[in-house]
Image (cartoon, coloured by chain):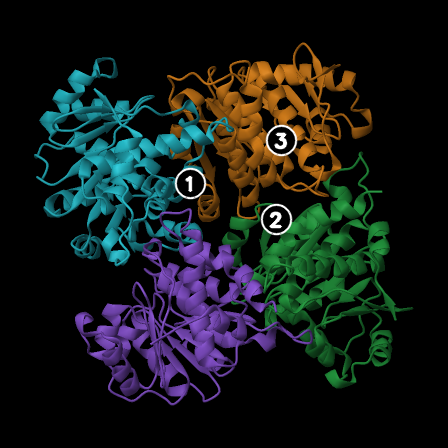
Chain colours: A green, B purple, C cyan, D orange
Amino acid sequence: MQSITAELVHQTIIRRPAESHKGTYGRLMLIGGNQNYGGAIIMAATAAVLSGAGLVTVATDASNFTSLHAQLPEAMVVDYHQTEFVSQLLKTMDVIVIGPGLGTDQLATHLLSTVLAHVQANQRLVIDGSALTLLATRQQPLPAVPIVVTPHQMEWQRLSGLKIADQTPTANHLAQQRLGVTAVVKAHHTTIYTDDRVWFNPGGTPAMATGGMGDTLAGMIGGFTAQFKDFTNAILSAVYLHSEIADDLAQSRYVVLPHQISAEIPKYMHRYSLN
Amino acid sequence: MQSITAELVHQTIIRRPAESHKGTYGRLMLIGGNQNYGGAIIMAATAAVLSGAGLVTVATDASNFTSLHAQLPEAMVVDYHQTEFVSQLLKTMDVIVIGPGLGTDQLATHLLSTVLAHVQANQRLVIDGSALTLLATRQQPLPAVPIVVTPHQMEWQRLSGLKIADQTPTANHLAQQRLGVTAVVKAHHTTIYTDDRVWFNPGGTPAMATGGMGDTLAGMIGGFTAQFKDFTNAILSAVYLHSEIADDLAQSRYVVLPHQISAEIPKYMHRYSLN
Amino acid sequence: MQSITAELVHQTIIRRPAESHKGTYGRLMLIGGNQNYGGAIIMAATAAVLSGAGLVTVATDASNFTSLHAQLPEAMVVDYHQTEFVSQLLKTMDVIVIGPGLGTDQLATHLLSTVLAHVQANQRLVIDGSALTLLATRQQPLPAVPIVVTPHQMEWQRLSGLKIADQTPTANHLAQQRLGVTAVVKAHHTTIYTDDRVWFNPGGTPAMATGGMGDTLAGMIGGFTAQFKDFTNAILSAVYLHSEIADDLAQSRYVVLPHQISAEIPKYMHRYSLN
Amino acid sequence: MQSITAELVHQTIIRRPAESHKGTYGRLMLIGGNQNYGGAIIMAATAAVLSGAGLVTVATDASNFTSLHAQLPEAMVVDYHQTEFVSQLLKTMDVIVIGPGLGTDQLATHLLSTVLAHVQANQRLVIDGSALTLLATRQQPLPAVPIVVTPHQMEWQRLSGLKIADQTPTANHLAQQRLGVTAVVKAHHTTIYTDDRVWFNPGGTPAMATGGMGDTLAGMIGGFTAQFKDFTNAILSAVYLHSEIADDLAQSRYVVLPHQISAEIPKYMHRYSLN
C-alpha cells in the first residue's frame, strides 16, 4: 500500500498551455439530483467547475435548474427526463459523472443503463452515490472504458459483496480486479484500488463527516479526469486535494462544508502547478 | 438559578473521533416553512448544518425547495404534504425539529400529531415556533422522549398558562415540571428549565431582536442534540453559543442577522473543542 | 436650507435598550415587486432588514418569493394578489413601504388605494417608485398620518406639477406644503422638505447612479422610521447614511451597487449609536 | 497591428460628472438565456451591471427570472416570448446585447431579426454567442448602426468564412471590412478589427478557458458602450480590463470564474478613472 504524495499531485496538475481554450479542458456532464436530493448534484457540479473543467453540463430534474443557476451560472442544464436529448449530448462529452442525488427509481436505472450502453472508449466515467446502489444489482459486465467508482464503505459492501469488517486492502483489491474499475473506497483514510496497485490517502478529518462531502469529491474527480491525461493520477490528485483542503479548513472549524472546499480548489491547484 | 458557563460548553463540545462518518453525527429532520414563512425553516436548517449535524433533511412546502437549495445544497428536501413519506423518513431520524415557520393550519396540526404519535424513545424532539402554539391547545400528554421547547415569553404564556408578568423562575419551573419537557424560555436573559434545575444564559444583546433569531437557535439545538450525548448540556451549549456569537458580532453591528450567526458556528465550536 | 449633520444622525440612532424584543423595533410591510421589477422589492426589503426593523413582511408577486428568500430568509412573504389577507396584515404593521417595483396596473392602483384608505394614525407610510406615479393621478386628499414620499426629479415633477428646471427649494417647499407630506427629492444633492424646514443632504456620488439605489433608500427609510421615534429625524438619518456609505464605497469603486450599501448599514448604525 | 494600452483605457474611463443620474449611464437590454443556457445571460447581465450601466433589463426565458434575481436584483426582467413587449422596450434602449445563451431556435431567430430590423441609428448593438451562429446564415446586409461582434475562432469561421488556420490578421481585417462591423475575435491573444485598424489585446491567461468567460465579456462591452462615447475605445477598454482582471486573479488561481471577474470590475474602473 502506497501513500499518495504531494509530489504526485504536483506532477499531475501541470501548468496550462497558453494556446488553449475551454474545449482543451474537457466537456463534462454530471447526471443526478432528483426532486429530493437536488443539492447533491449542485455540490458536485460546483466542485467540477472550480476544478477547472472547461464546459460543464448538468442533467437533472428541472426543479433543480434555478437553485443551481442561482449559485453556479457557469453550468448548463438539461432536464434528465429528456432522455433522447441527454443521449445525444452524452456523445459529445469527455467525462460523465453519474450518481450524486440520482436516486434509484426507474428513470435513474434507465439513465445509468443508457450511459453504460453508450459510453465510448475515449470517454471517462465516474460512478457515485445512488448509481453505485443500482450498479450493485446489475448483472452485465461493465464497458471497457476508464471507470472510477467512489463508494463509502456501505456502498462498497453492496458493490463488492464484502462486509465492512472484511474490507481489508487485500480483499478490496481482489474485488476491484473482479470489477475491473478503479475503486475509491471512502473512509477515515480513503484507499484507492487500481489494476496494479493499492493507494491510501494520508489526509482526512472527522470535520468532513457531513452530507455532500462525497458529492464534492465526485465532482472534483470529474473535473480532474477531464483535464489531466493519466486517469489514475487525476483521481489520486483529486482525492488528495479534497482532504488536504478539508484538513486545512478544519484547523479553525469544527465542521467543514462542501462548498467551502470547492471555493479553495483553484488556489490549491495553482500552488501545485507552480514549478 | 445557575449560569451556563464556558466550561460546560467546553466539556460538551468534544473533539470528534477520527474513526467516524456522517451517520455518527446524527440524522436530523426539520419540519416547517409554509408558503409565507419559508425563510424560517431555511434559517433553522442552515444553523443545523453549520452546527455539524451529519445528515439534514427538511420537510417543508415544495415552494421553499429552490430558495433552500440555492443557499444550502447540503440539506435534502421533502414535500411535507407527502405525509406518508415524511412518516417513513421520521423513523430513521435521531432528532426532529418541528415548528419554524410551520403555521397553524390543518396540515401543521397533522404533522405535529404525527411526530408526537410516532416519536421513539431513542429520538429527541425540538418544538419551536408555531408548533408551540399548536401544542398549547393540545390535551393529550406528551410522549416520554427527550423533548425541548423553545418559546419566547408570549409562546410560553400560551404553553404554561403563565402571563408574562408572572413568569418568575419559580413559576416557570413548576410549569416545566407539569409539562415534563425541557423549556428554553427566550428573553433578554434566556432561562432554561430542566427537571432538576434552573439555568440562565449570561449572554444576549438587543442586536439580536430581529426575525429569524429563534429559528436559528432551534436549528442549533437540533444540531447539538444530534451530536452530543447529554441532552441538557447539548441544549445549554447551543443557547450559550448562539448568544455569545451574537454578542461578539454586536461589538461592531447595530443589528445581527441570523445567517451571520450561523456562519460563525463552526469556528466557535472548534475553539471550544480544543483542550 | 439646512444641512443634515452627523450629530443629528448620532442623536437619532440611540443605543438599543437591553430589555427589548423584535416587536420593539417595529413591524414593517413592503408592498411592490411585480413580475418584471421583482428585484426592486428585494433590494428595499434587504435594506429594511439590515436597518434593524424587527419583523419584515414583503407583499409581492408570488414569482418573487424564491429569489427573495434565496438571499433574505429573514423576511416573510405574502402574495399581493391576496388583497384580503394583505389588508388584514396591514392592520398589524407599524410602517408600510409601498412602491418599489410595484408597477402601475390595476392591482397596483388597488393596493395603493387600500393602503391609503386603511392606514391608521399610529402607522407611518413610505411611498416610493411606481406608487408615486399613481399618486400623481389621484384626486383625493392624503390621509392624516405621517407620510414620506421619495421621488426622483421626474417623479417629483409628476407629483408636484413642477418641471425639473423649476424645482427650486422654495417652489418645492410650497408644493410640499400643498401635499402635506414629507418629501425627499432625490438628486445629486438630495433635498428634504418637511412642514417647517428645508434640509439638504451633504453627501452623494455619481457612483450611485444605478438601478435600485432608490429602492434601497426607501427600505432604509422604512427600517429607520420603524425604530426611531422622531419621524423627520429617522428619515433624515436614513438619507444621510445611505449616501455616506455610498461615498465611502466609491473611494475604491466606479459604481456602487445597492446590496453593497445594505451590507454596510449595521456597522454604520453601530458607530453612530456609540456615545 | 497595435496593442491596446493602459493609457487608452485610462482616457476612456472618465471620472463621472457630479450632476448625473442613472439615465446618464445608459439603458441596456440583454437578450438571451433559453431553458438550457440561462447561466449565460445571468453572467452577461452581472458584468453589465458591475460595469456601471445605468439601467439593465434582461429579456430571457421566464424560467431564468428567479436565478437571475437571486443574485442580481439590480436587473429588471422581461419574458422574451412577449416579443411585442420586448419590441416596445427596445426603442427605449441605448445598447442592446443579443446572444448569450440565446440558442438557435425559431424564437431566437425571430428575436435577432426583430433587433436587426428595428435598431436605430442612436443605438449600439453587441452580437455574441448563439446569435453569431444565426447571423452567419443570414443573407441580408446589417443595419448601419454601431455593431460589434464577439466571436471565438469557430464562430468567426462561420461568420467570416475563414477557417481557423486561415484567420490571419490580414484575412480577418478583410472579412471585417466586408461585414462592416467591429469584430472582437477571441483567442489566446484576442484581436479586434475596426474599419481603420487592427488591435491586439496584450493580456489573457489559460485560466480563463472556462464556460461563461465570453458571456462576461459581452456584458462588459455592453456596459462600457452604454457609458463611454467613443464606440471603439469602449470596446477596446472592456476587452483589456476583462483580461487584465483575469491575469491578476490567475496569479493565485488555476482557473478564474466569470463571476470573480465581474466582482472586480468596479475597482479596476475606479483606478483607471483617477487622474
Q: What residue is disc 3 on?
A: D132
Residue that appears at 72% across and 37% down: D251
Residue A181 vertical position relative to residue C171 in the rendered view, above or below: below
Q: CA distance from mark 3 to mark 1?
A: 42 Å
Q: Amino acid at mark 1?
A: Glu
Q: CA distance from mark 2 to mark 1?
A: 31 Å
SS category of the residue bearing label 2 = loop
Q: What residue is disc 1 on?
A: C264
Residue that appears at 64% across and 63% down: A215
Looking at the image, do the residues carrying marks 2 and 1 touch, with CB atoms under 8 Å apart?
A: no
Q: Are marks 2 and 1 on the same chain?
A: no
Q: CA distance from mark 3 to mark 2?
A: 21 Å
Looking at the image, do the residues carrying marks 3 and 1 touch, with CB atoms under 8 Å apart?
A: no
Relative depth, front residue between B8 and D135: B8
Q: Amino acid at mark 2?
A: Ala
SS category of the residue bearing label 3 = helix
Relative depth, front residue between D161 and C256: C256
Q: Position of residue A182 (x, y in %)?
A: 82, 67
Q: Quadrant of the N terminus of chain A?
A: bottom right
Residue that appears at 36% across and 88% down: B143
For residue D184, what is the image quadrant? top right
* Chain letter, disc 2 residue: A
Q: Position of residue A233 (x, y in %)?
A: 84, 57
Q: Position of residue B257 (x, y in %)?
A: 40, 53
Of the residues tagged 2 and 1, which is closer to the observer?
1
Relative depth, front residue between C272 and C128: C272
Of the residues tagged 3 and 1, which is closer to the observer?
1
Q: Are marks 3 and 1 on the same chain?
A: no
Q: Amino acid at mark 3?
A: Leu
Q: What residue is disc 2 on?
A: A75
